[in-house]
Image (spheres, grey):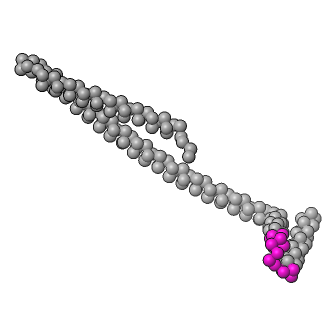
């Protein structure tokens, strides 16, 4: 299975970001836990100060959680937007390729028609040579397969001979 280096690099980048966010979340939670443990050991005089510190750390932890959620939402939206753009571009490319193939097919058809009208003997000669090549190929295939009788092979050989005669006659006429 072949991997795409660019995709792997992007995946590792997002993986590293996610790991960093998880670490930040854990650090914020540890701070809150540490503060709660200290609160249990503190006298009532220092309680108000420690409550303010705890409140600040809770707010910090909640902000970290919120930023992680927002980044995830942003990344998911970016991925969805990019996938939609890729799909749209693939559709446009497919339509372009189909129209290009249609144009090329029509162009070949028109060229063939123009050639047939401007040079009918030459066009007919090309057609007959193509038919001859097909018949000769078929003759050799059937001869080597051994599935056909000598009469059937003789019939194909006579068709080839007649076709060669027609081609020679057309070539003589075009030389004149």
Who's the residue at 32% across and 40% down the image?
A: 73
Q: Nearer the viewer, residue 89 or 15?
A: 15
Based on the picture, tell me whether residue 139 belongs to the magenta stretch: yes
Q: Position of residue 17 (x, y in %)?
A: 38, 32
Q: Position of residue 158 (x, y in %)?
A: 88, 77
**Is residue 39 among the parts visible in the rendering?**
yes
Rendered image quadrant of residue 150: bottom right
- Asked whether, in this view, residue 60 is left or right of residue 77, the answer is left
Residue 169 lies, with reference to residue 77, above or below; the image says below
Based on the picture, tell me whether residue 144 belongs to the magenta stretch: yes
Q: Which residues lie in the magenta part? A: 138-152
Who's the residue at 83% across and 70% down the image?
A: 144
Who's the residue at 36% across and 42% down the image?
A: 77
Q: Position of residue 59 (x, y in %)?
A: 20, 28
- Asked whether, in this view, residue 145 is left or right of residue 90, the answer is right
Dominant secondary structure, magenta: helix
Who's the residue at 6% across and 20% down the image?
A: 44
Q: Nearer the viewer, residue 174 or 145?
A: 145
Residue 131 lies, with reference to residue 152, above or below; the image says above
Residue 132 lies, with reference to residue 155, above or below; the image says above
**Is residue 124 among the parts visible in the rendering?**
no
Residue 163 lies, with reference to residue 1, above or below; the image says below
Q: Nearer the viewer, residue 133 or 63?
A: 63
């Amino acid at each position: 299975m072949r991997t795409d280096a660019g995709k792997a690099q992007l995946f590792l980048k997002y993986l590293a970001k996610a790991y960093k966010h998880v670490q930040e979340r854990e650090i914020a939670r540890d701070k809150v836990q540490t503060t709660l443990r200290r609160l249990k050991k503190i006298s009532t005089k220092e309680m108000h100060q420690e409550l303010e510190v705890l409140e600040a750390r809770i707010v910090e932890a909640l902000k970290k959680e919120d930023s992680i959620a927002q980044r995830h939402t942003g990344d998911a939206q970016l991925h969805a937007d990019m996938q939609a753009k890729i799909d749209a571009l693939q559709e446009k490319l497919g339509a372009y390729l189909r129209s290009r193939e249609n144009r090329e097919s029509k162009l070949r058809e028109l060229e063939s028609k123009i050639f047939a009208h401007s040079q009918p003997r030459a066009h007919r000669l090309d057609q007959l040579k193509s038919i001859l090549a097909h018949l000769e190929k078929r003759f050799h295939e059937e001869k080597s397969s051994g599935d056909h009788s000598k009469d059937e092979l003789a019939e194909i050989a006579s068709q080839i001979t007649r076709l060669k005669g027609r081609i020679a006659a057309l070539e003589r006429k075009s030389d004149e």
